[in-house]
Amino acid sequence: MRPIIGLTVLFALISIARPTEGQYLPAVVRSTSVPVIPEPVDTAAYRGDTGGAVLGALVFGAIGWVAGWYSGDLDALLLSESVGIALGAHVGNGGRGNPVAPLLASVGVMLAARVVARHEEVDSPTFTLMVPMLQIVLAVAAETTTGRRRARR
């Protein structure tokens, strides 16, 4: 019982005692300046060319496909076509985006299609045509997205 009374008296004395200057909390400083609102990005100034990126991906992808065809190796054909699509999307967009993003997208689709084709034994022409189309769509999307981000900086 004595410790409880002692602690109560101690807390009462602490709460009554006036704190020293160093024990005060600092006053809240309120800013009188106007908050800075970033200006909107003018998307017309970006001048990204999605049509050019698609055309570049088609042309460079076809060149890569022909180069891989002459090598005689299926893996070389698929890889050169994937790299051609990514490079074509980058060149067709005027080099505004990051060239690594469409490359990763295109090669990733190719590798995923290769895995599916090996495990499922797909010989469908639809599958064969859909893979390059998906590569082009994803490569162009990655290229134009990174180009817009660079334009904002």
Image (cartoon, rainbow, N blue to C red):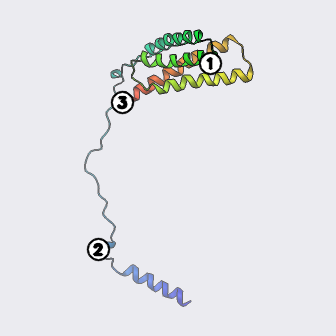
Of residue 149 and residue 90, the one placed in the foreground of this image is 90
Mark nearer the viewer, 2 or 3: 3
Q: Residues within 10 Å of mark 3 (few under 14, many from 20)?
A: few
The quadrant in which residue 16 appears is bottom left
* Quadrant housing the C terminus: top left
In depth, the one of 8 and 126 nearer the eye is 126
Mark 3: which secondary structure? helix
Q: Secondary structure at mark 1?
A: helix
Disc 2 designates what residue?
21
Q: Earlier in the sequence, mark 2 or mark 1?
A: 2
Mark 2–mark 3 Cα distance, whole angstroms, equals 49 Å
Q: Quadrant of residue 118?
A: top right
Determine contact: label 2, label 3, CB under 8 Å.
Answer: no
Point out residue 80 in the picture as x, y percentages from the top left corner. Answer: 55, 17
Secondary structure at numbered mark 2 = helix
- Between disc 3 and disc 1, the foreground one is 1
Label 3: which residue? 152
With 78 as the anchor, is 46 left or right in this view? left
Residue 75's disc number: 1
- Name the N-terminal-most of marks 2 and 3: 2
Which residue appears at 51% of the width and 17% of the height? 85
Q: Is residue 36 left or right of residue 12?
A: left
Q: Quadrant of the N terminus?
A: bottom right
Image mark for residue 2: none
Tell me if residue 101 comes above or below residue 59 in the rendering. Answer: below
